[in-house]
Amino acid sequence: GENKGVEEKSLKVGVNFIAPWKEVYKFPTFDQNHTWEDIKFQTQEGLQVSSNIGITFSLEPEKIPILFAKYRLGIQEITDTFIKNNVRDAINIVASKMRVEDLYGEKKEEFFYKVKNILHEELKPIGFNLHKVYIIGNFDVPSIVTEALNRKIEAIQRAEQRENELREAEAEAKKQIATSEGLAKSRLIAAQAEAEANEKLAKSLTPELIKLKFLERWDGVLPKVTDGKNFILNLDQIDQKR
């Protein structure tokens, strides 16, 4: 079968006796990190990008014989050759559908998430449990592209700042309008109240009441004008003057 020549036996910690004609390969089952430098790929625009990429994985003990039967190499050789190719191919598949600015922005996490999913489907059957795919440092692009991206980011930030300032100005203007409207309404209410009070007062001022109020306020001093014999206090004239 596919495992022909492979002995499905793990060696215990300590001294083990191995026949001279047998070769032992070590396949650790704990978490391992492998990194590769200068992995190149192209974005949706056809721009070539490179970066240092790393993966974290562990091996399923029961599938190690399958892994060895497939490649006939140790884990270091398998990882540095075949797994590296898998990683590069997965990155190219995902990057070809993304713009370079996406890799620098919010979609960077999405990029590695999709790469990891592709690798998981490919490597799981041969015993790889892929835990993480990550970048070491930054994506390497031509300096002219980096400058253009930085200018775009700065422009977006300035636009967002202006938008925030505009929202603040609009909010302040609405606040002032609301304050002015409130003040105007309060003045209108006060004026209406005063007008109603004056109207009620005017209706209540009968001639008799006016005469009474005059007498209540009279200090007893006689008028300067008399007819020679009697002083004249003509309340009807007072009413007419009112």
Image (tube, rainbow, N blue to C red):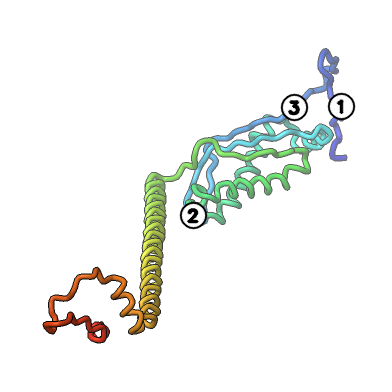
Indicate which disc, 1 or 3, sits on the residue closer to the N terminus. 1
Q: Return the residue at label 2.
A: 46
Query: Which of the numbered marks, if any, corresponds to residue 41?
Result: none
Q: Of helix, strand and loop, which one carries label 3? A: loop
Using residue 180 as the reference point, say whether residue 87 is left or right of it: right
Alpha carbons under labels 2 and 1: distance apart = 49 Å
Residue 171: where, in percent of width, then height?
A: 41, 60
Q: Amino acid at mark 3?
A: Pro
Residue 213: where, in percent of width, then height?
A: 32, 75
Residue under the image location 45 percent in, 45 percent down: 141
Query: Which of the numbered marks, if any, corresponds to residue 28?
Result: 3
Q: Amino acid at mark 2?
A: Gly
Point out the image quarter for the N terminus: top right
Alpha carbons under labels 1 and 3: distance apart = 14 Å
Q: Nearer the viewer, mark 1 or mark 3?
A: 3
Front-lying residue, 167 or 154 = 167
Q: Amino acid at mark 1?
A: Lys
Q: Return the residue at label 1.
A: 9
Tell me if label 2 and label 3 are in contact, CB under 8 Å.
Answer: no
Using residue 214 as the reference point, say whether residue 200 is left or right of it: right
Front-lying residue, 179 or 50 = 179
Q: Can residue 84 be seen?
A: yes
